[in-house]
Structure formats: C-alpha cells, structure tokens
C-alpha cells in the first residue's frame, strides 16, 4: 500500500515545469482565439436583426437564404485567409503573422458596424473572415512547439477554449445590448463596435511573445519533410519546397491530409450548417408556445450552448489523453451524430431545448473542433506544421461555405429547421469512419 501511494505521489502534475514563457504563449494564442470566437458567434446571434435593417420587405420573405449567404461568405473569406496566413507563418514566423491577423480583423469588425446595405455587410464579412483565418494555426503551432509533450494536449485544449469563451462573450454582450437596445433596432451594430477592441491585444502579443525556436531550428537545419515517416525516405535539399505543395507531394503526408480533410469537413459542415441555427430554432419554439420577447429565449439557448462548448474545450485535452486520440475522435462524432436529431427532431419545447443546448455544444462545437488543436500538430513536422494545420482547418471552408446557403434553402423548402438539420447531420457519419485509418499519437513526442 505504501509503495503504491509513493508511486502515485511521484507522478508529476500535468502543469509541473511550465514556465512564465509557456503561459505567455498560451495567453497570447488564447486571446487571439477569444476574438475569433467572439467575431464568429457575434455574426450568428445578431444576424436576424442585422438582416431586418439591411434587407427590403420583399427580401425578408426569404431570410434564411440571405442569412446563409452572410455566413457562407464569411466562411469563404476565412478559408482563403487561413490558407494564405497559415502558409506564411511557416515562412515569416508564427508571431508576426498572428499580430497582423488580430489587428486586421479587429479593425474590420468595427467597420462592419457601418454597413448600410447587405452587399456592404457581406463584403466586409468576407474581408474580416480573410483576416481571421490565419490566427488559429499560428497559435496552435506556437503552443505545440513550445510546450512540453506531457502538457501539450491540455494546453491545446485550453487554447481552443478561447473560442468558446469568445462565443460566450458574444452571447452575453448581445444579451446585455438586447435588454437595453440603446440604438433601438440598430443596436446590433454595437456588437461589431465592441469587436474592434482586440486591436489593443496586439500590443501585448508583440511584447510578450518570442518566436518558436523549434520552427527556427527546423528552417536553419533545412528539414523539409512533412512527417517523420516521410523523412526516412526523403532526400534533403537546400532549396526549400513550397510548403502547401510539400504536404501533398510526400506520400504519408498526403494520405494524412486527405483523411483529416474528411473529418474537418464533417465538423465544419455540422456546425455552420446545423448548430448555428439553434438560436433561431429557440425562437421558433418560443413563438409556437406563445412566449413574448423571443430574442431573450434565443440568447439563453445561445449562452447555454456556449457554456457546454467551453466545458468541452477545457476538458478535451484531458479526455484525449485518457482515452487516446482514436477513442476521442469516435466519441466526438458519435455524440454529434446523436445530438442532432435529439435537438432538432425530438425536442419540442423551448424549456427542453435549454437543457439540450449545452450538451449539443459539448459535442458539435467543443469536441468537434478541439481535436484539430490537439491532434493536427502531432502529425506534422515543424517546417510545415502551420501550413498543414491551417490547410486541414481552413480549406474545408472553401467547400463548407456553400452549406449554410444550402441549409437556408432546405429550411425554406422543408418549412422549418428540424428536417433540414437532421438531413445535414448525417455528415457526422464521416467522422466515425476516418479515425480507423490514422495513427494514434497518444503519449508520443512532437515530430521535429
């Protein structure tokens, strides 16, 4: 008994040995991802009200289609910007690209508040999405390359929780503005004004963060292979290959990227084409039950959904280490697949929806995106890590951006959210198939 207790006490805590530099890396990446989360969910919660200001009475008869277009062009910009910024981070460094990304989308968010037409609104959403795209991959690569292996999955989960805290902040800001309505029907514009505040964070990032030494060393030593398995067969070259082509040229890297893209596609379509309709669905249920102040019910559902997401993000690293990467992925997509009909087909009152919403958020936004922060950096080397992570995370938006528009059309055709959501939710089946063909990196060191 004494020996067992001694062995247990000898195991260091996951955060033992982390220095101030480690926590500063997490803080800077976390801040950037908070702002991304805020900006993304701000669009979702205020979109019904923005459209009432920007569309004509005739156009408002097809609101779902216009809403899908607004979300779709944001995704398109995010996807393109992520591909560009993620690749640049492997050439210019993680820190520099992160600063430029945060500053650009903060300023563009503020300008969105000045929109006078849907066209102007959509163009600004596209450009803001473009600016947001590269922040995630730079932060994930930076943390993965600076944190010790034992703590890395937990740190990645905490970083990813920034998106959840950002969405929660957006929901709370809209709740407060919705109660006060200082600008009346135009109060939605204040949400985007507040979104300009992240520009101040660039001062902290610039002063507190050092560049990734692991990335610098890989570049100095001219190690261009995309995976450790590819490195065994690749010949070293002095000229650096283009990273976006290198991850497809090498056989093992290409296989991993293509499989990961399928899972990323399932997560992306599942959230943007299904879960983003949850606030509107809450309004529909509240209206059917003859409640007043439908916006309040929408805000409650959005807030609870986001609370479930934050809990999921913060626990994801611990869960991934406890049950392994493959088990984590299977639990993620099985839960998301089940929660879609539970939410949109079997929940018939707004009170019941408030109970289901955080559980839905735990799987469809929390776990469904956490695996990318935890698992992706473990599959690629430092010279292409940001490019590969960004490509998997962002390129699916170049396809997924049409699905919010498609979902909007389906909702219009089916006469409601439920059938359209359940039909689109079948995409989660893909996430149950792919993990069987990918390596399990649990407990293994980060590839150099």
Image (spheres, rainbow, N blue to C red):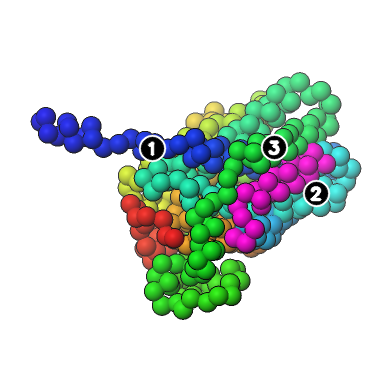
Q: Is residue 311 left or right of residue 81?
A: left
Please tell me which residue is depicted at 44% across the width and 67% down the height of the picture.
227
Q: Is residue 219 left or right of residue 429?
A: right
Range of magenta residues: 90-111
Position of the C terminus, as image quadrant, is: bottom left
Mark 3 nearby-residue class (10 Å; few <14, some 14–19, many ≥20): few
Instruction: Calculate the distance from the C-alpha at mark 2 to the C-alpha at mark 3.
Output: 24 Å
**Residue located beneath label 2 in the image:** 124
**Residue located beneath label 1 in the image:** 17
Can residue 199 be seen here? The reply is yes
Q: Is residue 360 inside the magenta stretch?
A: no
Mark 2 nearby-residue class (10 Å; few <14, some 14–19, many ≥20): many
In terms of image quadrants, where is residue 353? Answer: top right
Dot 2: element? helix
* Along the line of sight, the residue nearer the viewer: 75 or 195: 195
Instruction: Calculate the distance from the C-alpha at mark 1 to the C-alpha at mark 3.
Output: 27 Å
**Residue located beneath label 3 in the image:** 203
The reply to whether the C-beta atoms of the residues labelled 2 and 3 are less than 8 Å apart is: no
Instruction: Calculate the distance from the C-alpha at mark 2 to the C-alpha at mark 1.
Output: 44 Å
* Along the line of sight, the residue nearer the viewer: 258 or 297: 258
């Amino acid at each position: 008994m004494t020996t067992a207790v001694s062995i247990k006490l000898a195991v260091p805590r996951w955060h033992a040995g982390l220095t101030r530099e480690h926590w500063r890396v997490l803080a800077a990446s976390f801040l950037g991802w908070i702002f991304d989360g805020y900006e993304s969910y701000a669009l979702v919660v205020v979109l019904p009200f923005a459209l009432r200001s920007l569309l004509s009475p005739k156009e408002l008869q097809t609101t779902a289609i216009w809403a899908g277009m607004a979300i779709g062009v944001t995704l398109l910009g995010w996807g393109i910007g992520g591909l560009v910024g993620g690749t640049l981070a492997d050439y210019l460094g993680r820190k520099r690209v992160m600063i430029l990304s945060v500053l650009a989308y903060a300023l563009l968010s503020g300008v969105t508040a000045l929109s006078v037409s849907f066209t102007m609104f959509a163009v600004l959403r596209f450009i803001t999405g473009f600016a947001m795209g590269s922040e995630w991959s730079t932060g994930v690569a930076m943390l993965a390359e600076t944190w010790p292996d034992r703590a890395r999955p937990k740190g990645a989960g905490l970083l990813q929780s920034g998106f959840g805290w950002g969405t929660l902040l957006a929901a709370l800001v809209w709740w407060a503005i919705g109660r006060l309505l200082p600008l009346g029907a135009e109060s939605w514009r204040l949400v985007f004004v507040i979104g300009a505040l992240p520009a101040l964070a660039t001062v902290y990032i610039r002063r507190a963060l050092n560049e990734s030494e692991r990335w610098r060393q890989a570049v100095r030593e001219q190690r261009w292979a995309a995976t450790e398995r590819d490195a065994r067969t690749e010949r070293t070259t002095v000229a650096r290959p283009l990273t976006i082509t290198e991850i497809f040229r090498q056989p093992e890297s290409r296989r991993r990227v293509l499989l990961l893209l399928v899972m990323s596609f399932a997560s992306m379509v599942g959230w943007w084409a299904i879960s983003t309709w949850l606030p509107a669905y809450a309004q529909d249920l509240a209206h059917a039950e003859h409640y007043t102040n439908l916006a309040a019910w929408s805000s409650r559902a959005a807030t609870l959904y986001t609370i479930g997401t934050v809990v999921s993000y913060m626990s994801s690293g611990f869960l991934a280490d406890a049950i392994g990467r493959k088990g984590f992925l299977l639990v993620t997509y099985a839960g998301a697949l089940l929660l879609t009909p539970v939410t949109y087909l079997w929940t018939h009152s707004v009170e019941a929806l408030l109970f289901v919403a955080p559980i839905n958020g735990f799987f469809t936004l929390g776990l469904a995106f956490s695996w990318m922060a935890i698992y992706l950096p473990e599959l690629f080397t430092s010279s292409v890590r940001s490019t590969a992570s960004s490509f998997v995370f962002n390129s699916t938006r170049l396809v997924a951006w049409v699905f919010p528009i498609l979902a909007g059309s389906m909702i219009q055709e089916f006469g409601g959210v439920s059938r359209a959501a359940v039909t689109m939710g079948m995409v989660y089946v893909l996430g149950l198939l792919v993990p069987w063909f990918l390596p399990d990196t649990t407990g293994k060191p980060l590839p150099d």
